[in-house]
Image: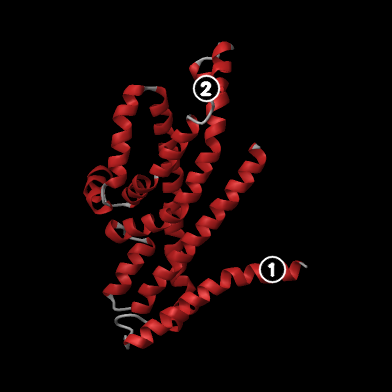
Amino acid sequence: MNDARFLNRFLQVAWPSALLVGGWAVWVRANGYTDLVAPMPQSVAADVLTHPGAYLGPVLTTTWTALAGLVAGTLLGGVLAVAVWSSRLLTAVLTPAAVLMRSVPVVAIVPVMIGLFGTGRPAVVAITVVVTFFPAFSLVASGLRAPSTSTRDVFTVLGASKPATLARLLIPYAVPNALVAVRIAAPSTILSAMLAEFLIGKSGLGFMFVDSVSYSHYARAWGTGVVATALAVAAFVAATRLERWALERVT
């Protein structure tokens, strides 16, 4: 029974990947592309599998950057959501600012971050934070508004202060939303970190892509994209399991 269940899950995961790789190979063959334009999947796979050490360092760097950006972005979004909940004035100021920050292209953010943090790893993390904080902001703000009026009235009748109401009523309602925000943002955080590394980084998968293209190592350049995609999927799966684990203990 366990073997059948494992096989079923494996097939559910394997067939989309096989379909994607097969479509990739057909697309390259049908258009007659050379490795200069688009290498075959086996060339990319050979580079990844025969040179794992070349990918390990960049993967660890990008993973660390993404994790730092995800944690900081979630905390920033949560703090801004609480600030919006606490004051109508802050709502009028912070909500448009958050939407504006989310809407500005990353390329336009880069000069600001370079001016604030230089061109090192802190700037890359800061760009990742800016790109990924919005889901936490919007979903936590929604969770803080979730309790019904009658539930809020109970706390008011009992004389609970605003901080006590926040800590004992509203934050527990917002925690599931925060976990959903982490799940939504986790894959995009990987890609945002890679994009920031591509623009100003000196290490990581994004820089590895630039370096590979510069030296005409196109199989490796495509390999960084494949590895980054796999890393984003792994981040989503890990965030989903974290959400389930946390909810089981909260509820």
Residue lying at 34% horizontally and 68% vertically, measured from the top left:
209
- Identity, as a three-letter code, of the amino acid under mark 2: Thr
Q: Is residue 214 above or below residue 84?
A: below
Query: In terms of secondary structure, where does tag 2 sit?
Result: helix
- Locate the C terminus and report the quarter of the image it occupies: top right
Tell me the number on the disc at residue 6. 1
- In space, the residues marked 1 and 2 are separated at their CA atoms by 47 Å
Pointer 1: residues within 10 angstroms few (<14), some, or many (20+)?
few
Residue in the foreground of this view, choosing between 53 and 208: 208
Q: Is residue 242 left or right of residue 132?
A: right
Query: In terms of secondary structure, where does tag 1 sit?
Result: helix
Kindly tell me whether residue 51 is visible in this rendering: no
Tell me the number on the disc at residue 149. 2
- Residue 152 is situated, as x and y percent measured from the top left of the image, at 54, 20
Q: Quadrant of residue 220?
A: bottom left
- Identity, as a three-letter code, of the amino acid under mark 1: Phe
Residue lying at 54% horizontally and 14% vertically, measured from the top left:
156
Q: Is residue 217 left or right of residue 140?
A: left
Q: Is residue 164 above or below residue 7?
A: above
Residue lying at 50% horizontally and 61% vertically, measured from the top left:
233
Q: Quadrant of residue 246?
A: top right
Pointer 2: residues within 10 angstroms few (<14), some, or many (20+)?
few
